[in-house]
Amino acid sequence: MIVKNLSSTSFDELLNCFLLAFKGYFVPVPTEKSYYENRWKAAKVDFNCSYGMFDNEKLVGFIIHAIDKRNGTLMAFNTGTGVVPEYRGRRIVKAIYEHALWDLRKRGVEKSTLEVITKNDVAIRLYKGIGFVTCKKYKCFRGKIKIGPLVQAEVRERDIQHVDWTSLPNQQLYSWDNQKESILKGNYTFFHVLHNNEPESFFIIDPDQGYLPQFDLLTTDKNGWKRLFCGIKQVAESIKINNVDERLKEKLDNLRLVGLNNVIDQFEMELALTTGNDKTLYQL
């Protein structure tokens, strides 16, 4: 078996391997090809910096990396790792990472990051063994917004391409797929929620998926949370929210108050990449 990048692997072959590897996962994963085409494009996946384990040209394991400069650092974000069932237990992910980290260093990547479900003890031990350390903990939510009929909100759409991101709070606490660089490549709409004809809060949403990458208050009025969720409900009653940083206690409390369920928790892990020695292509 041999590790090489995925630049010559067809999208269909990679997706078939991905879906097989994630069959029976902790949470159901989407199966539509268009979903992954859009998501990986928005995340800035680079197949030259994504890697697979091949057994006689058959893809049996993979690490898919998005590459981008975030906060001044050139980073590789692992947006998907998997091994097909019949090849598990053969240290394939460790072998792929040995090659991947060597190649990423050669390409000038300064940091590698990933997300892992907190219940996935096997994966967490593996990543720690490679050298990754936990840097954030996130909570993910799903459900229908439940809010009383007396709460009213005025919602106004804004051009997302002209958003002043420096005016939006807690930008440093969002995960890779929820950061502005990914949002601007995706199918998202920006809304202000107005109170007394002034922007009181904002939310960004994919109306087709009901996915909410960012939302927050712009004022200190705690009643603004009710109006914010009322505004969101006008666009999508059922929503999905991934990776709310656990330090945002007020936001988490208000998500629960409107009836959303905390379905899973994740760690963000990171590994600083320093210049390493060249090596030959890793083989098993």
Image: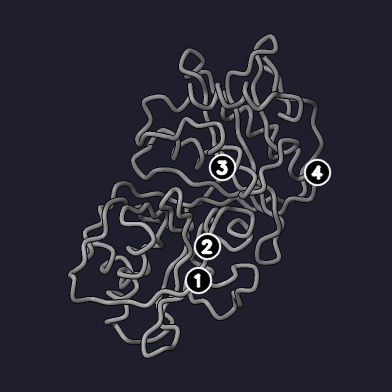
Q: Which mark is residue 106?
A: 4
Q: Which mark is residue 23?
A: none
Q: Percent x, y for residue 248?
A: 37, 69
Picture residue at 52% right of the left edge, 29% below the top: 82
Q: Which element carries disc 3, helix, strand or loop? A: strand
Distance from Cα at disc 4 to Cα at disc 2:
37 Å
Q: From the viewer's perspective, is residue 264 above or below residue 232?
A: above
Picture residue at 75% right of the left edge, 30% below the top: 7
Distance from Cα at disc 2 to Cα at disc 3:
23 Å
Q: How many callouts does the rendering have? A: 4
Q: Nearer the viewer, mark 3 or mark 1?
A: 1
First reached walking from the N terminus: tag 1 or tag 4:
4
Distance from Cα at disc 4 to Cα at disc 3:
20 Å
Q: Percent x, y for residue 18?
A: 53, 27
Q: Percent x, y for residue 187?
A: 56, 53
Q: Amino acid at mark 3?
A: Thr
Q: What residue does disc 3 label?
A: 79
Please rate how many residues cluster around mark 4, counting C-alpha atoms within 10 Å: few if below 14, some from 14 to 19, many from 20: some
Q: What residue does disc 2 label?
A: 189
Q: Nearer the viewer, mark 4 or mark 2?
A: 2
Q: What residue does disc 1 label?
A: 157
Q: Locate the C terminus and report the quarter of the image it occupies.
A: top right
Distance from Cα at disc 1 to Cα at disc 2:
7 Å
Please rate how many residues cluster around mark 2, counting C-alpha atoms within 10 Å: few if below 14, some from 14 to 19, many from 20: some
First reached walking from the N terminus: tag 3 or tag 1:
3
Distance from Cα at disc 1 to Cα at disc 4:
44 Å
Q: Nearer the viewer, mark 2 or mark 3?
A: 2
Q: From the viewer's perspective, is residue 277 above or below residue 108?
A: above
Q: Amino acid at mark 2?
A: Thr
Instruction: Report the front residue among 276 and 257.
Output: 257
Q: Amino acid at mark 1?
A: Glu
